[in-house]
Amino acid sequence: MSVQEQDLVVATTSTQTPEPLAKGNNANSIANNLTTSMPDVQVKTGQRAPRRTFSTAYKLKILDAYDTCDNALSRGALLRKEGLYHSRLSTWRKQLASGKLDTTATPSNKKSVNARKSNQALKRENQQLQQKLSQAEGIIELQKKIAELFGTHILPPDNSESNS
């Protein structure tokens, strides 16, 4: 080994000695200097992939395709191709058996399910209001007949509604 190579080896392997603590330096400032030069190796929590949602039609299609597979290899290939796990299929089967998986409608997301529920609630409310209206109209007709029998008007004739 030549002298130049030895100098190079010594220069690269030598370590610097830390500076002595001065009045302004303390252990915290040294630790801060060390941590700012090191990269952050913490796992970031906000970097998750969005949750996948599946339509009812897709669930039924995959369950049917899985049932038509004749051996475990083809079932495994189907699951790998679709990026699914067997546990998800088991959950879908339980939903289908319990009736939670609606086979008549195929909502693609939660918004359409919520919209359908809201629509059903509004239809029920409309029906109840129509029943109340028909009852109120019946009561008004009854009051008119009673007023005719007794010969008195509830309202003066000029303020009453026109006969319809």
Image: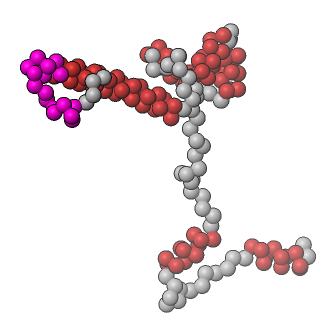
Q: Relative to residue 132, is residue 26 drawn left or right?
A: right
Does the stretch in magenta take in 147? yes
Q: Is residue 22 above or below residue 160?
A: below
Extent of the magenta region: 144-160
For the point 18% across and 31% down, the residue is 157
For the point 58% across and 46% down, the residue is 48
| x, y percent for residue 121 | 38, 28
Q: Residue furthest bottom?
A: 23
Colouring: secondary structure
Q: Relative to residue 161, is residue 1 drawn left or right?
A: right
For the point 62% across and 27% down, the residue is 84
Camera sees residue 33? yes
| x, y percent for residue 83 | 65, 29
Nearer to me, 30 or 65: 65
Q: Is residue 6 above or below residue 111?
A: below
| x, y percent for residue 15 | 69, 76
Find residue 129 and report its image quarter. top left
